[in-house]
Each structure stands twice: as structure tokens, then as C-alpha cells.
Amino acid sequence: MSGRRPVLLVVDDEPSILRLLRDVGDRAGFEVVTCGGGPEALEYLHEKTANIALVDLQLPQVGGLDVLRAIREADPQCQTVLMTGHATVDSAIEAIQSGAMDYLSKPIDFGRLGQLLAAVLAESDRRRAVAAADQEAARHLVCGGMIGRDPAMQELFRLIQRLAPHARTALITGETGSGKELVASALHEHGPRRARRLVTINCAAVVETLFESELFGHMRGAFTGATENKPGLFEAADGGTVFLDEVGELPLNVQAKLLRVVEHGEIQRVGALQAKRVDVNVIAATNRDLLGESAAGRFRSDLYYRLNVVQLHVPPLRDRRDDIPYLVAAFVRECSARMGKALTGVTAGAERSLMTAPWPGNVRELRNAIERAAMLAEGDLITERDVLAASKIGRPSVEEPPTGPRRSAPGESDRLDLVERDHILSILDRTRGNKSEAARALGVSRRAFYRKLDRHGLGGSREGAKTDADPAKPPKPGE
């Protein structure tokens, strides 16, 4: 096993038990954290996570079952074992219903405990192996820095490789953050001009009055402040490739001059009398419907058809969710190397959250989310808690929020709260509104389930709770 050792949390008010279990856990290969009571354990769980927790049932102040439920709510991936010197059938049933993986009587059967620890250790190793396999697979699903196993992405990669040697003009379409610049870079790198410059122009970031000067250059004295001759970006890219990002932002008068460059390879500096020839490939990208913009008179139709010799579309991340694990693996590896952290992947809970998030900002937003979560991660795996915390410190997306009823849902500022809310709604739909079955399906107690309903504004009041129980079956202990 490589990387940081999995964490064993022991909660007991007997110092001798803490010392004994510390030794057992250490020999089994765990990093052992001991807490002398419930409040100390809850404080630890507020900031950190564990792979397995051994919790005494009879704790002062905060009981063992309450600690167990808090662990379950804080990190559903943490396995929990309840320990007690006063074993009863009822307490064992309640422990299992509260999410414990097992129930140990004192004096502890160390053979059984060893089996439990070995199982958790094996699961930890398995998760590391899966994460390593995803990272290795990601290396083989790359084209020009893009990662894609989805059929649409694989087809895009094949088109890039076939078109790059020949295409002198191309138009790339796709939503903001989907990776259009990477497609342009891949076209350049797979083409015959790879040894020459690729000059990127963000058309949305150029001050409108300076477009001509930035793109085509100017002569000394052409305007106030033009104290010397200055070549434009097309001249700088002579012999190479110009990438016009967000080309739909170009003013109409500049579009006319761009058309001349694309058609005839001629530019004219602002204030110059003579045109100058340049030899460049032109790749343009946009998140707009340029055909619609052309029909509305905001984009020249002749320029659109001249740029649209070859069109490549980058699908949004929501349409290729199977790529998310591979993207996550690559981003985690990248963050691990840059931050000097021994990160090997993400937990199953974190992956579920990432897989179901809407990602209006596409791959760029996912990369930023992983970077923030990697900063917050304390172990070798990014947890669901890290992902949730990262979403809270992230800047609001500049995109419009998703349409539909979720606009008015509580917790709109927290994207992952919306994911949880939608998941609860789907479970309730599947169980036909039976809250007891829904709680069991989610792996939480009914009390915790009602708190979740209240938090998401889904009618979590316990009034009428009897109506969702099966009248033919008495409630189980702990429900």
C-alpha cells in the first residue's frame, strides 16, 4: 500500500481501551486517532474524515449512537463499529439501523476486529487501485491536452488528426469552458506548422477601439499615443497559426478586414498606405450561433462561410458524463504534482457528487472545483466534504443557472445541495413517498432524513409520519 495510511478513529472514555486499540490499529496499518468522548469526536469529524470508526456505546455527554449517526451524516463512506460492555439485542439492532457495519461486545474479540480492519484496509487499497487505473486510462485518452472516452470526443479526436495536416481555416463551436482553445491547439500541433507560433487573440477581451491596432498593427502617428510602428498579432504569427477566440465579439468593421486576411492573406496596418502579405492559418472559435448572428446582421455572412470551411463542435460536459472520472483523475494528478500533495484520487461519495453536478461552466468549472477541493483535502483522497466545501468557496458561475423548478429551491447558492435535493426527490419518487423506505435507501436514520427534508424545503415535518409507514409492519427500533 502506498500513500498515506487509512485513518482509524477510536472513541472511548476508557484510556486503557484507547491505548490498546491504538496499538492494534497501528499494527494493522492504520493511522490511529483517539478521542476520549463524543464532543471531541464530533469536533474532529467537523474538520476531518476517517476510513473506519470504533465507537463505545456508553459515552458520557454525547452517546455512542449519536456519534455514530453524526459520522454517518458527515461521511457516509466511513465504516463504523459500535462497542459495548452491555450488549443487548435492541442496542445491536439500533446500531445496525443507524449504519454501523458491525457490533462488538467487550471484552473485544480481537480476531473479529482484525477481520473488520483487514476488510476496510482492502477497500482502501481497492479505491487507490481504481484511482490509479483511472489516471492511467486518462493518459491514453488524450488529444492535445483534452481527455475524452465518450464517442463524440473520440470522433472529435479523429477529425482533428485527419484535418490538421490540410485545413488552413477552421471554426470551432461549443459552450464556454468546453475546451475550444485546446481543440485549436491540437489542430496546430498536429499540423505542418507545429514548429511555428500559435498566437491566441481573445476577441472578447480587446477594447473595441483597439481591435484594428491589436490585430493588424499601426504606423507611428496613426492616432494619439502611436509613438512608434507596431506590428499586429497577424504579423507576429506569420508562418504559423492565429486563433481567434470568441470571434463573434468582433465589430463589423474589423470583420471586413479579417475577411480580406482570410481570403487574400493581406493585412494593412492602421495608418499605412500599403497592404502587407502574411501567411497564416486561421482558426476561429465561438460560443454563439454565428448563422443566427449573421441573419440578425451582427456577423458578416461572407466571413462566416469563409471561416466555416471546417467546423468542429466540442460537446458540453453534461452530454459526456462518462468522461468525468477520467478528467477528475487527470486533474487530481496535476494538482498533486503542483501542490506537493500525495493525492491519489477521490472517494466514491465525491465521485457521485461530481458525476451528478450540472457543470454549466463545463470542463473549466470541473477543473477549478478539483483544484479547490485539492487545496482543502487532508488525506490522500478528495472526499465529498472537500467537494462540498470547495463549491462554497468557488466564485458564482458567469453562466445562467439551469432553468426549471430548481431555480426557486432552497440552497441555490450551493450547487451540490441541489444535487442532493434532486437525489432525495428521485428516491421519494421511487418509494412512492414512503419516507421510511427512502431513509433506508439513502442509508440514514429517519431523524437524519427528516432533517434533510427540512433543509431542502421538502416537507420534513414529522407531522403525519405515521402515514408513510407500512400499516402491516410495526416500526423497527430506532425509526
Image: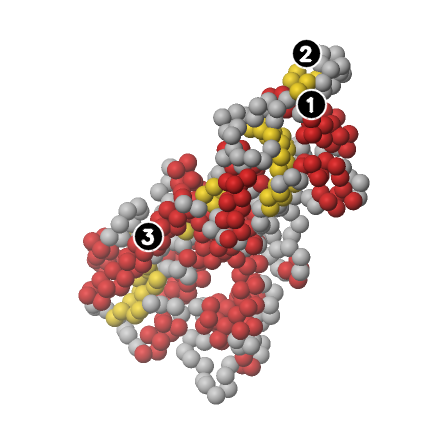
Q: Quadrant of residue 101?
A: bottom left
**Residue that numbered label 2 is attached to:** 228
What's the amino acid at mark 3? Ala
At horizontal 36% and vertical 53% (from top left) the residue drawn is 130
Residue 359, disc: none
What's the amino acid at mark 1? Glu
Q: Is residue 118 left or right of residue 394?
A: left
Q: Is residue 403 left or right of residue 70?
A: right
What's the amino acid at mark 2? Glu
Task: List x then y, in percent, for residue 75.
Answer: 42, 58
At horizontal 69% and vertical 22% (from top left) the residue drawn is 267
At horizontal 71% and vertical 12% (from top left) the residue drawn is 220
Task: List x then y, in percent, for residue 308.
Answer: 66, 40
Q: Is residue 278 above or below residue 343?
A: above
Residue 129, disc: 3
Q: Is residue 83 above or below residue 8?
A: below
Q: Do the CB atoms of the residues marked 3 and 2 lie less than 8 Å apart?
A: no
SS state under label 2 = loop
Residue 266, disc: 1
